[in-house]
Image (cartoon, rainbow, N blue to C red):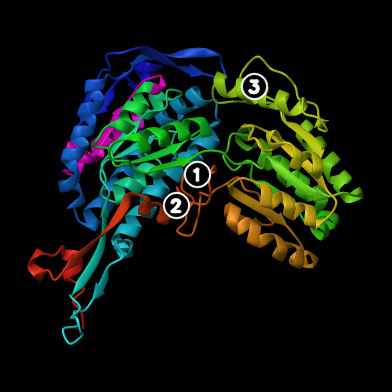
Amino acid sequence: MSSILGISGDAYIDGKAVRGTQASFQAFDPAQGVEIGPDFYTVDSSQIDQACRAAQAAFDPYRATSNAQRADFLEAIGAQILALGDALIVRAMAESGLPRARLEGERGRTVAQLKLFADLLREGKWQDIRVDQALPERTPPRPELRLRMIGLGPVAVFGASNFPLAFSVAGGDTAAALAAGCPVVAKAHPAHPGTSELVARAIVQAVADCGLPAGVFSLLTGVGNALGGELVRHPAIQAVGFTGSRQGGVALMAIAAARPQPIPVYAEMSSINPVFLLPQALAARGESIAAGLAASLTMGVGQFCTNPGLVLGLAGSHFEHFSFSLAKALGAAPPGVMLTPGIAANYQRGVAHLASQDDVRAMLEPVASDTCKAFPAVFRTTSAAFLASAALADEVFGPVTLLVECADVDEMLTIAEQLEGQLTATLQMDGGDLEAARRLLPALERKVGRILANGYPTGVEVASAMVHGGPYPATSDGRSTSVGTAAIYRFLRPVCYQNFDLALLPEALRDNVPG
């Protein structure tokens, strides 16, 4: 397969294909249970340093490019990704176990993200230009002040396991950083190194075609945590984009904070995405809500950060009917292939841990598996048991959810107040539920980045108003988003120019002459 796809096992540093000098590894096909060639190699410290220094050297000339030039570059990356054709999809299928339709959709999303940021650049308002006229007559006189946003500097981007395209080498973090004028040093996820190499090749080609400094993009390959830690410690790196586990994100945050110059880490980590079944909606639409939740839970074998892992409803016959309907729908769903053996094993441990908890019963008995296949599971508990056990609020990455029986809306609100920060919360509600929703909203606004009405949290729209973030531990910084045009602001900072001659000002500030 590797010869057909032209995959070499190389990293890309400063525009050149290079071979790592450390431990070799191969990709793994979770559907077939076999390794896939060719061999890939872990880069060494000098190669990490070379990539970071090349990014640092490229920063000033790259950020000096015009909005139009960077927009053209982002669209060129998208065109090069599409030019990879079916080879990219075939390799991604083999490395992830994900079906063709999902990956073709993800490729479209990846290209759409690049186009969204290209459109943002051409529109220009992202620079947040502000001009305060001089007031010489004031005592004391006020100077003329002009503000714009500039890129932070080189950004380290970590590819995610569950999105080999949209949250990986050319995913949202990379698109936002490049749009901001920041070079990117990407760390390929070891679960899909061939996919990462193909996409990296597309970016490198776009860099060359657009006449940009080669250090604008590099791809590092390798296994083990040391590589990522060394990348984040490098003094050239000025910000980090990460999507993955809480353990991994917190480790990178600690490394970044311990640097002589601390830097921001934008880490998306863990979320159980509560769904609140308000009384009238549950009575009127319980069965259809159950069908929608089952589809959401099993989408991508539950391997989404927005998977609805917690469902709350009021005790009574309607909640009973909903619970059995959900268990029945999930019981009819076939098992799915998880992304890696490690993720599959963690899912089995998480399900077993839920099953072992006091006052928790299985509505759909978990099925053990010693392969990468995962079966859906549903558990049920009471609000009192949930509030008494922090373990019941732990994320289990996969197609499982916990139903919580509440006595009234007050208990729902108590649970909402106790929850950690979340990416999403969903209100299933009808007209008679507006007062209950109004009571819940203040707590949810404090806890959540995106609140849905009568929807399902899986499926994150690539759009300007989207927020894919939330208070810790959903993300490391609840003020930011990793999807949508606001993502660019993670990699920008403001600079003020006081009493500058127009000839010295950046062009964007010269065009905004007061009065």
Q: Name the residue under label 3.
A: 373
Q: Residue at x 41, y 56 (%)?
A: 486
* Residue 180 percent location from the top left of the image: 29, 51
Upstream in sequence: badge 3 or badge 1: 3
Of the image marks 3 and 2, the number of the one nearer the N terminus: 3
In contact (CB < 8 Å): disc 1 and disc 2: yes
Residue to which mark 1 is pinned: 475
Name the secondary structure under disc 1. Answer: loop
Q: Which amino acid does label 3 sit on?
A: Lys
The answer to whether residue 332 is visible is no
Residue 410 seen in render: yes
User: In the displayed structure, does residue 235 sit left or right of residue 371?
Assistant: left
- List x then y, in percent, for residue 218: 27, 32
Residue 243's spot in the image, x, y percent? 47, 37
Q: Could you say which disc has been placed on residue 480 in the image? A: 2
- Residue shown at the point (37%, 50%) measured from the top left: 490
The stretch in magenta equals: 198-225
Q: Nearer the viewer, residue 162 or 240?
A: 240
Between discs 1 and 2, the one toward the N terminus: 1
Q: Is mark 2 on a helix, strand or loop?
A: loop
Q: Are marks 3 and 2 in contact (CB under 8 Å)?
A: no
